[in-house]
Image: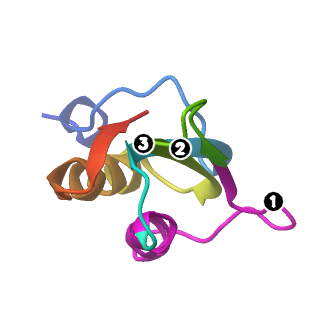
């Protein structure tokens, strides 16, 4: 079996600019929790600040971090850690 056939096929070309969005209930530390998870795996895209948006009623927050993605495995690890986090309701 060749190395290429063992790898997961990706439509992305790495490295690339890639936005990661996580949503959860509004809390004092939700932004820092998401940022910590993302930064454990990747660097933020230069000059691209973390974006935080509250829901209309203010009960939920969405946090978007634009990263320099280096591999599909890196993205999979970020999404796995986000979905494993009790505070994160959804990750896109």
Membership of 69 in magenta stretch:
no
Q: Residue at x 43, y 76 (%)?
A: 36
Q: Quadrant of the C terminus?
A: top left
Give the class, few, some or many, for how many residues have Cα within 10 Å of label 2's Cα (few <14, many ≥20).
many
Indicate whether 67 appears above or below 22. Answer: below
Q: Quadrant of residue 5?
A: top left
Q: Quadrant of residue 47?
A: bottom right
Q: Residue at x 19, y 37 (%)?
A: 6
Q: Residue at x 38, y 56 (%)?
A: 74
Q: Position of residue 19 (x, y in %)?
A: 61, 43
Q: Which label number is shown at residue 62?
A: 2
In terms of secondary structure, where does tag 2 sit?
strand
Residue named by callout 3: 23
Residue named by callout 1: 48
Left or right: 83 as drawn, with respect to 71:
left
Q: Position of residue 81 (x, y in %)?
A: 24, 59
Q: Residue at x 45, y 42 (%)?
A: 60
Q: Which residues are magenta?
A: 30-52
Circles 2, 3 touching at the beta carbon (< 8 Å)? yes
Nearer to us in this view, 58 or 67: 58
Nearer to us in this view, 72 or 49: 49
């Amino acid at each position: 079996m060749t190395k290429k056939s063992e790898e997961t096929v990706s439509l992305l070309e790495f490295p690339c600019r890639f936005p990661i969005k996580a949503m959860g209930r509004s809390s004092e530390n939700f932004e820092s929790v998401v940022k910590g998870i993302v930064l454990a795996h990747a660097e933020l895209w230069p000059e691209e600040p973390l974006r935080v948006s509250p829901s209309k009623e203010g009960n939920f927050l969405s946090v978007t971090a634009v990263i320099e993605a280096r591999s599909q495995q890196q993205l999979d690890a970020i999404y796995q850690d986000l979905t494993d986090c009790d505070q994160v309701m959804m990750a896109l």
